[in-house]
Image (spheres, helix red, strand yellow):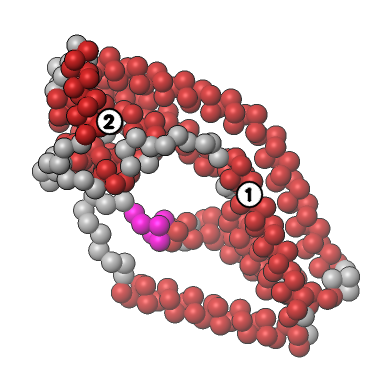
Amino acid sequence: MNSSALPLLAILAGALAGGGLAVMILAIRGLPPKAPGSAPSMLERQLRQLFSIRGAAAIAAGVIALLLTRWLVAGIGVAMLVFSWQSLGGAASERKAMARLEGLATWTESLRDTIAGAVGLEQAIPSSTRVAAASLQEPLLRMVDRLHTRVPMPEALRRFAHDLDDPSADMIIAALIINSRLRGPGLRDLLGALADSVREELDMRRKVSASRRSTRRSVQIVIGVSVGMAIGLAVLDRGFLAPYNSVTGQLVLAVIVAIYAVGIWWLRKLARFDSPERLLGFEQAAVPAQAPDPELETAGSWRGGGA
């Protein structure tokens, strides 16, 4: 084995030992307790992805690249590339957002039909969880748990809006908050109009996503060919890439990997939809239910005056 690779292997061994120690401490102590009905934290979501099939495939690909090239940076870079390949270009996040939009429209229509049978929101919302899409099940169940623990309806709806974090959902939830306070008529027609608006937005997003599909595929081909060529040269013609065997060469390779990472992050940012500003933000969701909301009171008085 080349003596220049010994420091890199020592760094890898130290990183694996430190990671194993951190996982052992986390397994012994456990995660801090959460409040009932609270959403999973960012750390929990990252750990779930890391210990999933996607994370196992990324680690396996990184180990294979490390064994073939004997480059620590190459192993880490390939592992990160495989882990983020599914979301490369923002296609996965777009599909998730569109699935949530479709589920939101279906849930709104179901809620409209349930309210049409002279049923109040307190009974309609828990019964709507049975027909809700999988993307809405967890936030809906948390809201139902809050209602069962005597949380007022406006406050539970605000926290539901915070869990969804979607501007289209804010319009629907704002209408439900106003109705839960004022108990005025016309909610069924308003929910129907909002559901139609969400479906129109969903159709627009599908058309834009279809037009971007070829660009995403081209980006994936370019990245795959570049990484495959680099690994092929490292395996078949190691003399051509011999300068990367040293510590200085690994630092240069780390800069190249960082440039690729910035390019992928930039592509994902360009692929995102420009969402409008949310009507119900986190600051509003934290306000107690007893505190008056000037925006909702003004909207309610305008609606009452228009009647």
Against 96, residue 258 (above or below) is below
Task: Pick out the residue farthest to the bottom.
Answer: 3
Task: Pick out the residue farthest to the top.
Answer: 307
| Left or right side of 150 for 14 | right
Q: Quadrant of the C terminus?
A: top left
Q: CA distance from mark 1 to mark 2?
A: 34 Å
Residue at position x 70%, y 86% in the image: 6
Marking on residue 276: none
Amino acid under disc 1: Trp
On the image, which quarter does residue 249 sit in?
A: bottom right
Against 151, residue 51 (above or below) is below
Amino acid under disc 2: Ala
| Left or right side of 40 for 33 | left
Mark 2: few/some/many CA within 10 Å (<14, 14-19, 20+) = some
Q: Which residues are magenta?
A: 40-45
Residue 8: percent from the left, percent from the top?
67, 81
Q: Which residue is mark 1?
A: 266
Closest to the observer: 140 or 64? Answer: 140
Residue 179 is inside the magenta segment: no
Residue 10: percent from the left, percent from the top?
63, 85
Residue at position x 69%, y 59% in the image: 259
Closest to the observer: 216 or 303? Answer: 303
Marking on residue 174: 2
Residue 86: percent from the left, percent from the top?
58, 48
